[in-house]
Amino acid sequence: MLSISPTISKFSNLSDLHHLNRGRYSRHSLSHLVPPPPSTHIRNTKTLRLRHNFRISAIDAAQPFDYESKISDHIAKSKTLKIAIVGFGNFGQFLAKTLVRQGHTVLAHSRTDYSAIAAEIGVSFYSNADDICEEHPEVILLCTSILSTDKVLRSLPLQRLKRSTLFVDVLSVKEFAKDLFLQILPLDFDILCTHPMFGPESGKNSWKDLPFVYDKVRIGRDESRVSRCEKFLDSFAREGCIMKEMTCAEHDQHAAESQFITHTVGRILEKLDLDSTPINTKGYERLLDLVENTSSDSFELYYGLFMYNKNAMEQLERLDLAFESLKKELFGHLHEVLRKQLFGTKERSLGLLQEPRALSKLPPNGNGSSLPPQSDSSN
Ligand code: NAP
């Protein structure tokens, strides 16, 4: 009876099966069952006879000629990409560690020679931009500083890349990155703008539940291009990131209201040189964490958040106004207390004394940056 295991029956190509069997059973052990066939049809006849005489029910340790392991390798590889990281600083290295763990082939290029660090992580480092492009990566992942991206992108020898290459960036400002890509890259290249909303500090243990923003700016309709983009995004999705698709403009609006404010407050507090105390509250601990988080990022990054997000200036002004408004509220109360002490009895008897009123909040974002008119008596 012809009986072969499901694993083997997947291999419809008889010569494949022949190779598999040849590896597992020596010619010698088969010789008593299979007489030598005529040389011209050696492959097919031998394989057919094997199918009639053997029942292979298990595949054990994977061997280099073992097709089961080859196929599972192929499936694993089909989920992976050849990714070239350009800008192998703090953030580039941080991303590389996870991409390597996931099985991607990761190459890197940077202004500084990071070959030793790259080797430790399992990344091939190229000091020369021509050399890395000639490796024909499927994805170029730009992890350069916001300020240097224009220069770096223009200096890449694009003609050495495959024309379908996918360009991805991780810049913390998105409209700027998108405009640069559209301006500099030939139409053949695909463009994916992303921003992982975490860094080496906040994502050091896990990326689970951390937001990842992306905008598929230009992805060709070809199935291979679509699937390459999905494979790249999946590197973050499978780590548990919260995947948020939005336009670069929407991102910049939200990021100025959240990320830029966070970095600014962190940097203001850093200037206070805060110390841990024996009686830290939970809130204070969080502030210390904030300082640590923001100070581990380069000033260049912070400056980029300000310079290249058109919404950042408004947020800086609002922060300033909010601080002034808060001080006014405090001093207003203080003024009232003093007035009560000095003139309280006299004014109360004349009905002139009023309770101080709290200043209202600033108008919502985008409604101008001036404070609402104050009717407070302390003015
Ligand atoms: P960064 O200071 O913003 O960028 C450092 C990178 O830029 C290094 O690879 C550096 O190369 C390169 N670079 C700087 N000036 C250059 C120049 N003149 N010419 C060529 N290359 C230059 O710090 P980062 O934290 O690594 O951030 C990299 C990117 O990731 C930024 O665009 C940032 O917005 C984004 N990002 C960062 C975080 C984060 O938490 N850090 C999170 C999300 C996104 P060399 O090291 O070779 O000099």
Image (spheres, rainbow, N blue to C red):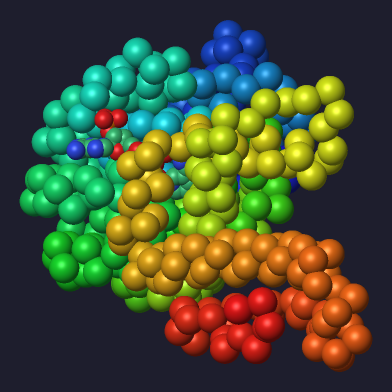
Asked whether the viewer can see residue 288, the reply is yes
Name the spot of residue 6 as percent of width and height, x first.
73, 45
- Total labels: the figure holds 0
Name the spot of residue 283 as percent of width and height, x first.
79, 44
Residue at horizontal 37 percent and vertical 57 percent from the top:
306
Outermost residue to the top: 28
In this rendering, the answer to whether 304 lies above or below 73 is: below
Name the spot of residue 266 as percent of width and height, x first.
56, 44
Residue at horizontal 67 percent and vertical 63 percent from the top:
331
In this rendering, the answer to whether 81 lies above or below 176 is: above
Location of the N terminus by quadrant is top right
In this rendering, the answer to whether 79 lies above or below 59 is: below
Q: Quadrant of residue 109?
A: top left
Query: Where on the image, by quarter, is ligand 1?
Result: top left
Residue at horizontal 63 percent and vertical 31 percent from the top:
274
Identify which residue, 277 or 20, lies in the foreground: 277
Left or right, 279 with respect to 320, comes to right
Q: Quadrant of residue 300?
A: top left
Left or right, 140 with respect to 362, comes to left
Identify which residue, 197 or 278, lies in the foreground: 278
In this rendering, the answer to whether 67 lies above or below 136 is: above
Residue at horizontal 42 percent and vertical 71 percent from the top:
314
Asked whether the viewer can see residue 45, the reply is no
Location of the C terminus by quadrant is bottom right
Outermost residue to the front: 346
Name the spot of residue 155 as percent of width and height, x first.
10, 45
Q: Quadrant of residue 25?
A: top right
